[in-house]
Each structure stands twice: as C-alpha cells, then as structure tokens.
Image: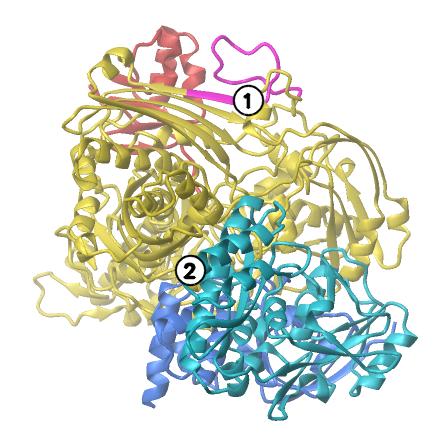
C-alpha cells in the first residue's frame, strides 16, 4: 500500500524488477568474503584479551612462532605508534591493543599459519602477561567519583567549566531553545519526568567479518572483504599501517548484512600485516563468538526526560538528560541522542544535555539510526502516558505536535518538505488502526525520526556495443541498491532495466565513494548515477546529431532514442543500440561519469502500530500484528523499500523484547551466541504491513529520501505502548523480557489490568 | 579445532562398547548438537568421536503391544512422525518436537538429550513422568534403569565408564491416561527452556485423578518430581483448588538459580503456572481418550 | 595425520573428498569440495545458514562431522536448480524480493525445500515454525514467508 | 555579502549565547573567517564537524559554498549514520 503525492509518472522508477544480483544469490554462487580463497593462502587467527581491563606487561610470541605451519605472528609493536589526539586513535588501538586492553575480546596479537587449526593452536601459545585492572562495566560505575579512568588522556569535551582532570566522559553535548525553562514548565498543566535504562545490543548481521589480504613484494596489497564501504577500508587500513592509501586496493565481496556494524574495520590491517610478514595471502574469518565479543554493539543508555504539556495536548517544555555508553572509546551516541530526542515535535522550550561515557566493553559501532531508537523509546512512551493522563487520543496528540515544513528543528533550521504528518495519517487511515483487539491484547503507536545523510559518491556509465549499459558505483549493495541504481539509470537513459548491468566497482575501478551509512546509497550514489546518465544523454544526442547530419540542439532524447526535432524533413529516430553500434565512427566509446558531494539529504519519518498479546502469568509477549508507515520520498524499488521497513521492524522488536548484552561481574560476555543472544526468528513475528508514504525530497532528482534506518526507530516504543495497553504496566527498562514483564505485572497487582 | 580427532562409526553395540574401552578419551555422540558447540567453546577434545547412528538398534522404534522400544539415537523428527508414540505419549512427543529447529530435529535424540544431562533438557521430564526405562550397555551385562536415575547433576550421569544408553522402554499407558509438556522460552523457538513442566494424569471413571506424575525441568540441577502436587490431585477433579495446589507445590519444589536465562523468583512463579497448565492439558487429553489405551 | 576418505553423492553426482576426523561437513563442503553456497553464520546450529539435506534429512552442516557423510546422499543449494530452470522457491524468492543481503538465502532455500517436500501446503504458521531454525536479519521474514507460500502454490499447480 | 547566521545552541559559546548574528562572506569559508574575527573561537568551532543548511539544503562540507547577499545560513552539528 502506498500513499503518494502527485509526482511525475515514471516508466522504471517505482517498478519491481528482479534484482540483478539475485540469480547468484539464490543459487549459492554469490561470493561473500569468507567464500574467497587465494592460491597459497594462510589462515589468520586473532589473540584476544580474556580480561575486561588490563595493562599488557609482556607478550611472548616465541613459542607460537616455532610451531608447525606458523608463518607470521604480529602484535601492536608491528604497527606504527599512535598517540591520543590522532584523528583515528580509537580505531587504531581498537583493532590491535598496544599497552592496555579495554574489554574482553580486545585484539592484541595475530597469527598466520598454513591451516586454521595450526593458527588456532599457535594463537593459544602466545604468552601474554597482564596486570589486571578493575573493570568499569556500567554507566554508574563509570561516573562514580573514584572510578578507575580508562584513558589517562580523556578530558571531557564540552565541559563547562573546562575539565581539568581526566575522566570517563569524552563528551558533553548541550542544546537548548535559549528560553526560560522554568517559565516554560510553568505554562504546563501536566509535567511528567521518567527514567529509562537500556543495554547494548548487536547489529546481528548473519555474515561474520572476513577478509583476505595479499601483500606483494612490491609493497602493494589487495584486500578482498565485505564492508559497507571499501574506500573506508582502504583509508583506515592505511592509517593503521602508516601507509599511503594508494598502496592498498580493496575489492568488495558481497556483504552479508551490516546495519552500521561494517562501517568500521577490525581484521583487515591484521591480515595485511600478517601477509606482508609472511609473503603470502592471509585469510581471516571471525567466529560468531568473536563477532559478539569484539565488534559493534550499539550503546546502552540511561535516559531521563521531563515533559511539560498543556491540557489540550500542546507540548510546551522538554528537558532531557541522556547518557550513552559507547563501550571502551568515545562515540557519537550522546550527540545523536541529543539531536533526535525532541526533533519530531514542536517544543518551544527545551534543554538537552547528553553525556558519552566509556566503560570496559567492546567499542560500539553504528547501528541503524544510531541512538535514535532509544530516545524514541523514552519520548514516545512518555507521549503515550501524556495522552492517557490527559484523555487525548495518542494519534491526535502526535498530529497536534508533529513538525512540518517550516517548523524549526532542535538545531534551529526550518525543516524543508517532510512527511511526518502524512505518515501519521497513513496509519490513522489504515484498517489496523480501528481493528478490534483480542483478549489479553494491546495496541501501541509510536513514531520515529532519522536525519539521513549525503556525502560523496561516484558512478560511471559505460554503454556497450549492443546498446546495453554498465553502471559502476562505489557503494556496496547491502540490500538491493544495485537494482535501485539500475532503475534510475533505466529511467534516465530510456534503456530497459534488464539491459542495465549494475556493478560495484573496487577502489581502483570507480571514483571515491563514502561508506554506505546514513541511508545514503540510493540517495547520494543514485544522484551520481543520474548525473552520469544525464551527461551520457548529452553525449548520445551529439553522436546522433552527427549520424543524422543535424545540429545537437535539434535532437532530443525520448524513451531511449534520439529524435530529430528540426525542420529539415523527417529523420528516423536512432535507438541507443544504433548509436552504440556506430560509436567508433562518431567519437569513440560512450562513457560518462558522475561524482558529487550530495547535498540535501531528506529527513525520514516513520509511524508504527503494533499489537501484542501478553500472557499475564508468564510475562511472555507475542507481537501479533504490525503496520508501519514511512516516508521514502520516492520509492525507487518499492519491494526493497518495504524490505528495509520490515527489517527495521524485526530488529526493533528484537531490541524491545529480548536482545541485550549480558556480562558477568568481571566483564566477560555471557551470551555470545545466537542461542542466548536472541534475535527474532520467523515464528516470533507476524506479517509486517509496510505503508510507503511518498513525500518527495526536493533535493533529489527523483525525490529520494534514505529509507534504511528510520524503520528501526519506532518499534521499541510501539511494543512498549502495546504492552502497557494490554497490561497496564509501563516498562522503562530494556529488554522487555518475560522476566521483566512478569515482575511488572506482579507489582501491578497480578493480572492484565487495562 | 577438532581436526586431530578420529571418527568411528560402529554398527553394533558391542563394537561401540569395545571402542569406548580401548580409547581413553573416546566420546560417544548421536546428534552432536551439543557436543560440537561445546568443543568449539573450549571443552577438551575427545580422541575419538564414536558415532552411534549407524547402529540399527539405536535408531529403531518398535512396539511389542504393551511396550514401546525407542532407540536412544533415534532422531526426534522420527519420533514426532511416529503415529503410535504420538497417540500414546502426546506430551513426550511434543517435548521431543521442541528441541531446536527442524535442522536440529534431524539429529537430536532422547539418549543425547538425557546423557548430555543439561538441567534444562526438554525430554527428561516427560520421560520421567511416563516411567521410561533406559537400557544401558557397557563392559558388563546390559542393565535397565529408570530414566530418572540417569542424570545426576548438570553434565553428570550415572553411566559408568564405557557405558552407553542403547534404548528406552515405555509401557503403553493405561486407560484414561495422557501426558503433556510445556516449557517457557522467551522466543517462540530455538531457545533453551527457562522452565519446563511435564505432567501425566490417569483419571478414574468419575473424572477424578487416580494417579498423577509431575516433573519440572530447568529449576534444579536435575529434573524435580513434585510429589506434593501429585498428592494434591489424587482423588480430586483436576480443577479449582486441586490445580491451585499443584501450582503452589510446583513453585515450592522448584530450586532454581539466577542466570542469564531467568531469575529464581521468575522460575519459581512460572514453574507453578506451567505445572498447573500441563496438568490441565493432560487431564483434558485423558478425558478425551476415555477407555482407549 | 591421516585423513579420512569420504565417498558420497552430492547434488546427484558422485563425489569424493578427504577430510579430518573432526572436520565439520560444512568445512568439508566449503574447503574440500568447493561448494561455498552453505555459509557459517554461527557454528552452533542456531542460524541455519549452513543448512543441507543429507539422506533426506535437513540439518545444519556445521553440526555434522564430515566423515559421517560416507555413503550418503547430500543436497546443497547448488543442486536446487536443474540446468537453466530455477526451482520454484528460487524463482519466488527472486520475484518476491525475499532476500536483501542474501547470505542467509541458501540456507532458507534448502530448509524451505525440505519443508515443502514434507508438507506441500503449509499455512503461514507452519512456514514460520518450519523456518525458525534459519535466521534472517534483513527482511523481517515477511517476504520470505510470502515467497514460500507462492512457491508452494506454484508447485501444487504444476 | 551580508549574511544572516543562525547557530545551533551548542555553538553559541563564542557569541555569548547569541543564536542569530550577522556577518559577511562570499562563501561559507569566508563567512566563517569573518565570524571568527567578530567572535574569536567561533571559527574553530565551525570548521570541523559542522554542516550548514542553506535554503533548506543540508550541506556537510560547505567551505566553498557560494553565498548570495541576504543569505540565511544555519550551522548545525554533522550527523553520522548506520
């Protein structure tokens, strides 16, 4: 189901062709990183810290080096020293620890051997001596006055007055309306203040990190790996090694899920260093256990929000105090939390303070709309509470306060055309909104917001001799973006979408392209494709003019062919294939590039409606119906837009109900497997009805907004509000597991209340 | 990992027992659904993995009319597909079907589930309420013990060196008898039981409970029988106060731990709920079954 | 160390490989036979990305020792299509956009085929429980379930 | 080129809390230089990790972006994503 503003009618954009890389993926032939093998390759294994916080006093690799099959052993000493203050210091010392390990699973050495078993045995033989330090495992511990300090150099940025002593707080971010908060709250008829806690969660991509690196005697290296951005793999790896970027070529493998977790690197510099030392290609593949312990969790939080509302439902004041743990290093959690917490609603008086804190757990990585699902959890459940308290319909409350074009964002600028109200209305008008509920069921409504970003992208369009086109871009295809690129190219060139071959080019085959993050691939790389195609059309018109003996101004490009519009009688139109066939005689190969820094990423809004059924005797919550609207701007390939929405919902539901990192008292992760880190399985979910709202982004030639991230923002509060509706219990700590739900129901008097 | 291990696939019980006697670090397995992950997680590697699935007797289901014999390595997928077992022991068969995914069902077995001795295993409570017997082979003569006597603690069994479970024996239940099994998991599939409860009920001609057996999983080091609950049912209709007493007795009998999967308080409370519900389902089935056996 | 010689049938063709006694079938298929369609997502039987069918039984090849394959018949995702003709499941996954990153897709296809072989007309709940051993983190399962429904209908029609 | 400059609230330290100030510049880079001369320290704050919004268009790396007389420029923190 699609809600559409009037827009141009397109021949290809908005259709649902089979994706171009689909055949390889349903036949098992697609090559993901772990599927690649190089002649003579060795196998690399990482040595990891068993301690959450320790000083490395010595590493003895001599025994490991002498073992059968072992060709190279490396430690932090094999990499250039890096000092705090270096732009990528955190990334560098996270990939391989130097003097200190900061979490259980922190890499500190690596071994390459002829077989994986030999490498594993040798890794176990690397002797490391530690001075174990007290571990800081929670926000409260990190902020305690006598807390052990993780980084001696960490002075709080944004502290007022400026920090004089190191602490576990890398950043404090403050935003405010600059108005009198006391007066703002004084205008309110209802003031509520609530606290929330959430635990780190993992992106949970099914493909563990993997790469192969081959360093030649000429000092150049080639890396095959899966990532969300191979140019970033190149530059980050080069930074760690102290090399020039251009000594490294990165060839992207298919990527088996990322969700933000593959925007950074872990293995590649180790594989390159091992390969350089051994003079052989080195393959490294993480186990699932390593993925959980040493990569990507999204931050845990403590959030406190105070809202002031007038009796008619007008929000008048908001005060937010947000704390994000980004694991052992600084991260953007607090800033992004601060930028999203009040962004969806008109709140004239607001004050936001956000802290990042470091603790002895794995360094957090981006996860789909980073930080926003948690601020939405707090804000949207509080709005639900406000609606209940004031006797206002939850939908009406949101419609009354929703931001629209021209309203100021938290950052001060006025929003361009956005589709929040349209998303709310789409859900309000959906049959689900008024459908009756069954026994023990409850319904929850929640909204979500995400910025989306632009950044740099490149594309090359090559027309082939037969009139087909190859479109090369630098964005890895993490969920169907090849098909989107082909659709936009087809629309521009007037060539059938199946006559377009979309290709992800390596770092030496296409222009620089930033990481696929911030839902930017279809938006920004799509713009580069459109730019290249438009240049190509100019070129095609020129070639056709030559063939027709006409002036280029007399030739239009219509539906894949050059059409003569001049007054010199009739001339047959020239289809693209005819022009391609004569390319050699009209000026040579037909190729065009587009490369740009994309401006005008359009914010995305989403509104979700969730029904749950709660077993009040066991606390078990089942999601029984789900509807999700989202403003896509324009859906280039609606199936994959729906897929992004549905995937975001599933991840959000998992986050709401069961997913969490569990550590023991020493900071050792207790659930590093898919058995006990419980991502949703097929039987946990109903069908997810995705409503695509299309309020075109004025900054994109086809109106595209990013769609990859916003869908994960509303599910947590939607589920929480549904649980409240079913049970009368407000649960303000994640996950809302059976244990926690039953505790709440028991405390509330024992049975389904509402 | 694992590469140094040898693999053996005996085709007779005697051959399997012989292998276990000759190799000090030999380890038997049927599905390996627990064993391979345990070794990957750092458990010491056996020298030989002895695969029991090529021994016909360990994978066969037969019935003598009054007794079912089920090979200890029989995949639970086969057990679930067996109409006779499903009719006679619906709860036990449901418990069998709950072990993991369809993929795991191809490999999981009663023998493996019991000998792995996880406190949270799904089938032992149901085997126990149905008075299943385990036939054990080893260096000495074959012996038969109650299934309840096999697991002695987390990861520990009463099996002697070189002994394996060969098969299980289950007597056809008497008239007006049925069982049920319920477990609590956070998701709908793929989880380890946070609490499991098995019940078997025999009704008399008046619909009152003639005998009952109730056993709980995941709330103690081994399966817990709940004699107080059983006593509360006998002579009463399985409803009202009697059911409430079952819940209370089950909660009281539970002796769980706090861990990553649940808390003491949660497991106690839910043990009572599941025991009560399992009794209700078993009793309903027993009523439906009437005089058939 | 001596390796084990295994003779079996893979995707209809006779096959032989050498493996270590403790090597998993998944590693043998990927590293010894060269069939990389089955993936290792977890190594503990929890994600189903390594699903194959051995002697008619769907299983996680990461939990099978490679020597167990001796004398067996194995089907992997690489054997699903016959020549140029995709299996209806493959076709319906493509047409229904039932894959995003595609890394779980081989496991889902193998498991879904096993499900339909056993139950040609499953309802939504049966599909969801039947595929609960296969994790997908991209799609939310919606389009996968619909693709299996569509494939079941296509098979039953033909 | 007189330009109206709006600062998100975390960038207002050097202006003594002023949210909206006037400055001059033919490009965003020149504008920042001018702002720095008027409000010492503001230049550093605006040169890294800061985007602008001009005419509703979010621009992440705006140094050479041309400005028309009377332009309205919003300085906001740069975002990231997953």
Q: CA distance from mark 1 to mark 2?
A: 38 Å
To which residue does mark 2 refer? A684
Type of secondary structure dominating the magenta stretch: loop
Q: Residue at x 64, y 61 (%)?
A: B223
Residue at the extreme bottom = B64
Percent coordinates x, y for residue A604 in the rendering: 29, 42
Relative side of A568 to B152, left or right: left
For the N terminus of chain B, the quadrant is bottom right
Q: Nearer the viewer, residue A228 or C108?
A: C108
> Which chain gets the red colouring?
D
> Which chain gets the cyan colouring?
B
Q: Is residue A166 magenta?
A: yes
> Which chain gets the blue colouring?
C
- Asked which secondary structure carries label 2, the reply is helix
Q: Residue at x 35, y 12 (%)?
A: D34
Q: Nearer the viewer, residue A21 or A246?
A: A21
Q: Nearer the viewer, residue A565 or A706?
A: A706
User: In the rendered image, which quarter is residue D67 located in?
Assistant: top left
Q: Is residue B39 above or below residue A467?
A: above
First-in-chain label (1 vs 2): 1
> Which chain gets the yellow colouring?
A
Please say which color scheme the image uses: by chain
- Give the label on residue A169, or none: 1
């Amino acid at each position: 189901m699609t809600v559409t503003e009037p827009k141009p009618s397109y021949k290809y954009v908005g259709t649902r062709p089979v994706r171009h890389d689909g055949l390889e993926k349903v036949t098992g032939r697609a090559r993901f990183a772990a599927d690649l093998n190089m002649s003579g390759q060795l196998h690399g294994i990482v040595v990891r810290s068993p301690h959450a916080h320790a000083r490395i006093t010595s590493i003895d690799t001599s025994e490991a080096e002498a073992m059968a099959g072992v060709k190279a052993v490396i430690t932090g000493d094999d990499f250039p020293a890096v000092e705090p203050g270096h732009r990528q210091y955190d990334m560098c010392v996270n990939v391989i620890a130097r003097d200190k390990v900061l979490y259980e699973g922190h890499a500190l050495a690596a071994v390459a051997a002829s077989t994986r078993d030999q490498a594993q045995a040798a890794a176990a033989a690397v002797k490391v001596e530690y001075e174990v330090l007290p571990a800081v495992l929670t926000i409260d511990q990190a902020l305690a006055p006598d807390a052990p300090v993780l980084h001696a150099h960490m002075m709080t940025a944004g502290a007022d007055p400026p920090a004089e002593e190191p602490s576990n707080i890398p950043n404090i971010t403050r935003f405010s309306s600059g108005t009198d908060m006391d007066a703002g709250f004084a205008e309110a008829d209802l003031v509520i203040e609530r606290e929330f806690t959430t635990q780190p969660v993992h992106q949970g991509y099914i493909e563990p990190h993997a790469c192969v690196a081959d360093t030649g005697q000429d000092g150049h290296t080639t890396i095959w790996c899966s990532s969300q951005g191979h140019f970033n793999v190149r530059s980050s790896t080069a930074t760690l090694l102290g090399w020039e970027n251009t000594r490294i070529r990165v060839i992207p493998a298919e990527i088996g899920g990322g969700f933000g977790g593959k925007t950074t690197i872990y293995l590649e510099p180790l594989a390159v260093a091992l390969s350089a030392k051994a003079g052989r290609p080195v393959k490294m593949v993480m186990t699932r256990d390593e993925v959980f312990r040493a990569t990507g969790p999204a931050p845990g939080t403590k959030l406190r929000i105070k809202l002031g509302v007038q009796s008619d439902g007008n929000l008048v004041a908001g005060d937010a105090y947000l704390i994000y743990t980004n694991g052992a290093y600084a991260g953007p959690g607090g800033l992004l939390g601060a930028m999203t917490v009040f962004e969806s609603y008109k709140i004239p008086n607001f004050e936001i303070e956000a802290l990042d804190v470091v603790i002895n757990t794995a360094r957090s990585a981006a996860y789909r709309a980073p930080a926003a699902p948690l601020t939405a959890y707090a804000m949207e459940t509080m709005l639900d509470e406000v609606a209940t308290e004031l006797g206002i319909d939850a939908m009406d409350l949101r419609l009354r306060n929703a931001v629209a074009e021209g309203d100021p964002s938290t950052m001060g600028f006025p929003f361009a055309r956005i589709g929040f109200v349209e998303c709310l209305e789409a859900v309000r008008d959906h049959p689900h909104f008024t459908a009756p509920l069954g026994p023990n069921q409850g319904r929850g409504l929640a909204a979500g917001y995400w910025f989306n970003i632009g950044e740099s992208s490149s594309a090359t369009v090559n027309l082939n001799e037969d009139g087909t086109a190859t479109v090369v871009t630098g964005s890895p295809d993490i969920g169907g973006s090849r098909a989107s690129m082909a659709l936009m190219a087809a629309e521009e060139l007037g060539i059938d979408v199946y006559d377009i071959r979309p290709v992800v080019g390596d770092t030496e085959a296409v222009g620089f392209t930033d990481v696929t993050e911030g839902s930017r691939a279809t938006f920004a790389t799509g713009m580069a494709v459109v730019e290249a195609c438009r240049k190509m059309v100019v070129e095609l018109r020129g070639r056709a003019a030559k063939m027709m003996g006409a002036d280029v101004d007399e030739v239009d490009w219509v539906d894949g062919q050059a059409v003569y519009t001049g007054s010199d009688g009739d001339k047959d139109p020239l289809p693209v294939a005819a022009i391609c066939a004569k390319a050699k005689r009209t000026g040579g190969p037909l190729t065009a590039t587009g490369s740009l820094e994309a401006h005008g990423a359009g914010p995305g809004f989403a509104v979700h409606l969730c029904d749950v059924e709660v077993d009040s005797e066991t606390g078990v919550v089942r999601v029984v119906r789900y509807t999700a609207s989202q403003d896509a701007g324009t859906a280039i390939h609606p199936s994959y837009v729906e897929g992004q929405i549905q995937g975001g919902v599933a991840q959000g539901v998992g986050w709401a109900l069961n997913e969490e990192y569990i550590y023991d008292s020493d900071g050792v992760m207790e659930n590093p497997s898919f058995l006990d880190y419980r991502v949703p399985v097929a039987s946990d979910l109903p069908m997810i009805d995705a409503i695509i709202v299309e309020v075109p982004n004025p900054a994109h030639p086809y109106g595209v907004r990013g769609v990859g991230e916003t869908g994960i923002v509303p599910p947590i509060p939607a589920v929480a509000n549904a649980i409240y509706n079913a049970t009368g219990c407000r649960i303000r700590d994640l996950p809302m597991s059976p244990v926690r739900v039953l505790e709440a129901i028991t405390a509330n008097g024992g049975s389904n209340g509402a | 990992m694992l590469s140094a291990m040898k693999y053996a696939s005996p085709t007779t019980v005697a051959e399997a027992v012989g292998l276990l006697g000759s190799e000090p670090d030999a380890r038997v397995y049927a599905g390996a659904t627990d064993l391979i992950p345990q070794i990957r997680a750092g458990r010491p590697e056996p020298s030989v993995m002895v695969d029991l699935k090529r021994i016909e007797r360990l994978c066969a289901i037969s019935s003598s009319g009054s007794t079912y014999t089920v090979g200890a390595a029989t995949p639970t997928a086969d057990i679930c597909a067996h109409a006779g077992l499903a009719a006679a022991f619906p709860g036990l068969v449901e418990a069998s079907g709950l072990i993991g995914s369809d993929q795991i069902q191809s490999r999981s077995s009663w023998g493996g589930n019991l000998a792995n001795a996880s406190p949270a295993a799904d089938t032992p409570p149901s085997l126990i309420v149905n008075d299943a017997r385990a036939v054990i082979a080893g260096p000495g003569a074959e012996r038969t013990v109650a299934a309840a006597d096999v697991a002695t603690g987390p990861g520990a069994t009463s099996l002697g060196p070189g002994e394996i479970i060969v098969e299980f024996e289950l007597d056809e239940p008497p008239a007006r008898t049925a069982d049920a099994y319920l477990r609590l998991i956070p998701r709908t599939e793929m989880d380890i039981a946070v609490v499991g409860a098995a019940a078997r009920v025999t009704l008399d001609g008046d619909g009152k409970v003639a005998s009952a057996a109730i056993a709980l999983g995941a709330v103690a080091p081994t399966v817990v029988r709940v004699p107080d609950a059983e006593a509360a049912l006998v002579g009463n209709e399985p409803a009202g106060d009697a059911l409430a007493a079952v819940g209370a007795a089950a909660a009281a009998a539970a002796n769980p731990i706090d861990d990553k999967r649940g808390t003491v308080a949660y497991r106690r409370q839910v043990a009572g709920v599941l025991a009560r519900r399992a009794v209700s389902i078993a009793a309903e089935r027993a009523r439906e079954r009437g005089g058939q056996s | 160390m001596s390796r084990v010689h295994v003779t079996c049938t893979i995707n209809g063709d006779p096959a032989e490989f050498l493996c270590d006694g403790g090597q998993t079938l998944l590693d043998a298929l990927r590293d010894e036979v060269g069939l990389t369609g089955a993936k290792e997502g977890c190594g503990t039987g929890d994600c189903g990305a390594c699903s194959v069918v051995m002697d008619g039984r769907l299983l996680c090849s990461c939990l099978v020792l490679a020597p167990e394959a001796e004398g067996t018949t194995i089907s992997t995702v690489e054997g699903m299509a016959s020549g140029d003709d995709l299996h209806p499941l493959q076709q319906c996954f493509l047409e229904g956009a039932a894959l995003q990153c595609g890394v779980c897709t081989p496991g889902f296809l193998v498991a879904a085929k096993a499900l339909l072989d056993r139950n040609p007309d499953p309802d939504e709940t049966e599909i969801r429980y039947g595929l609960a051993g296969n994790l997908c983190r991209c799609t939310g399962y919606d389009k996968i379930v619909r693709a299996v429904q569509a494939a079941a209908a296509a098979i039953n029609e033909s | 080129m007189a330009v109206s400059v709006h600062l998100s609230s975390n960038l207002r330290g050097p202006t003594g809390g002023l949210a909206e100030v006037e400055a001059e510049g033919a490009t965003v880079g020149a504008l920042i230089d001018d702002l720095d001369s008027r409000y010492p320290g503001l230049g550093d704050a605006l040169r890294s990790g800061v985007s602008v919004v001009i005419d509703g268009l979010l621009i992440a790396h705006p140094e050479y972006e041309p400005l028309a007389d009377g332009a309205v420029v919003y300085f906001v923190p740069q975002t990231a994503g997953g």
